[in-house]
Amino acid sequence: MGIVIVDICDASLIKALDIEAILEEEYPEVAVIESSCLSFCGMCAKRPYAIVNGKKIFAKTAEECLELIKKQIEIELSIFA
C-alpha cells in the first residue's frame, strides 16, 4: 500500500478515466481505493472528484480533476522527500 491514498467513489464522474491504472503506474507510492460511497452525497453525480490523503479534489472534467490530483500527490510526496 502506498504512502499517498487516493479515495474514489465508484459512482464518481472521475471513473470516466481508469484512474487507478493511471495513478498507480505513474506513482508507485500511491494506492487508489475505490469505495461504494464517500459520504459526499450528490457530489459524485455532479462533478469528478477524489480525496487525496484526506483532501477533497474536484474539477469540471475528469481530465482536469486528474491533473489536480497529480498536483496534490506531488505535494504529498514532497513531504517525504
Image: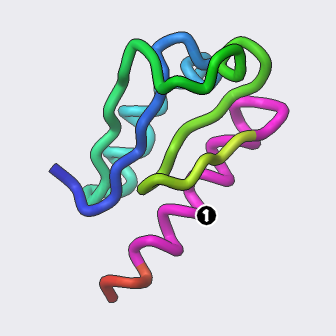
Residue 54 sits above or below residue 51 on the image = below
Q: Mark 1 points at which residue?
A: 71
2 sits left or right of 48 in the view:
left
For the C terminus, the image quarter is: bottom left
Q: Where is residue 15 in the image (x, y as percent from the top left)?
A: 55, 19
Look at label 1 and name its amino acid.
Lys
For the point 39% across and 84% down, the residue is 79
Q: What element carries label 1?
A: helix
Asked which quadrant contains residue 60, the reply is top right
Is residue 63 within the magenta segment?
yes
Q: Where is residue 10 in the image (x, y as percent from the top left)?
A: 46, 14
| Residue at far right of view | 60
For the point 46% across and 53% down, the residue is 54
For the point 52% across and 24% down, the residue is 39
Crowding near the residue tagged with mark 1, few <14, some 14–19, many ≥20 C-alpha atoms within 10 Å: few
Q: Position of residue 23 (x, y in %)?
A: 42, 45
Residue interval drawn in magenta: 59-77
Q: Main secondary structure of the magenta part?
A: helix
Q: Nearer the viewer, residue 23 or 39?
A: 39
Residue 1 sits above or below residue 79 on the image = above
Is residue 5 within the magenta segment?
no
Asked which quadrant contains residue 53, the reply is bottom left
